[in-house]
């Protein structure tokens, strides 16, 4: 089993994703979250073929589920789910993903 914890940021919600290989290239995902919308995804991503999970976004069961349940388009949870699946199926090594904001000096805005 591969476990990923996603700290979604300003919303303050934390999500735990557990991806478990069921057979050679199939995986099931358990999602636990303080976020009601994310929690509703639990049980929807069971026994998926790796291509069903990791295929192009328009064909991905993960993205389809996210579009059905999530209300915020910038929620990082779907990426956490996909990364957990990749690692569980030995398609990637476990490495943290970070989005880091840097405060830059702003120039005055013009009216043009």
Image (cartoon, helix red, strand yellow):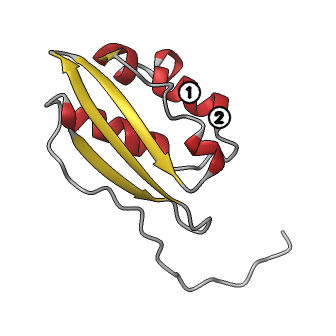
Where is residue 70? Give x, y as percent: 64, 40
> How many residues crowd mark 2 within 10 Å: few (<14), some (14–19), many (20+)?
some
- 6 is higher (above) or lower (below) than 19: below
- Residue 42 image offset from top left, x and y in percent: 50, 34
Instruction: Report the disc number at residue 69.
Output: 2
Residue drawn at point x = 65 percent, y = 28 percent: 68
**Labels 2 & 1 near each other (Cβ < 8 A):** yes
The numbered mark at residue 17 is: none
Q: Describe the element under mark 1 as helix, strand or loop.
A: helix
Instruction: Residue at 14%, 15% (x, y): give it.
Output: 24
* Quarter occupied by the C terminus: bottom right
Left or right: residue 11 compared with residue 60: right
Residue at the extreme right of the image, as rendered: 111
Looking at the image, which is closer to me, 106 or 77? 77
Quadrant for residue 93, please give it: top left
> What residue does disc 1 label?
65
**Spatial distance from mark 2 to mark 1, Cα to Cα?**
6 Å
Q: Position of residue 2 (x, y in %)?
A: 23, 42
Q: Is residue 28 left or right of residue 109?
A: left
* Residue 34 image position (x, y, % from top left): 56, 56
Badge 1 local density, few (<14 within 10 Å), some, or many (20+)? Answer: some
- Residue 61, above or below 83: above
Q: Is residue 62 above or below residue 81?
A: above
User: Which residue is depicted at the point 35% across and 23% down?
Assistant: 54
């Amino acid at each position: 089993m591969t476990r990923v914890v996603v700290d979604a940021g300003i919303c303050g919600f934390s999500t735990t994703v557990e991806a478990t290989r069921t057979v050679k290239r199939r995986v099931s995902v358990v999602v636990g979250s303080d976020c009601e919308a994310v929690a509703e995804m639990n049980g929807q991503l069971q026994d998926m073929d790796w291509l069903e999970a990791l295929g192009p976004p328009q064909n991905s069961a993960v993205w389809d589920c996210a579009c059905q349940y999530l209300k915020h388009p910038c929620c990082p949870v779907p990426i956490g789910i996909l990364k957990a699946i990749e690692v569980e199926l030995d398609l990637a090594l476990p490495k943290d993903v970070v989005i880091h904001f840097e405060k830059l000096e702003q120039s005055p805005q013009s009216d043009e």
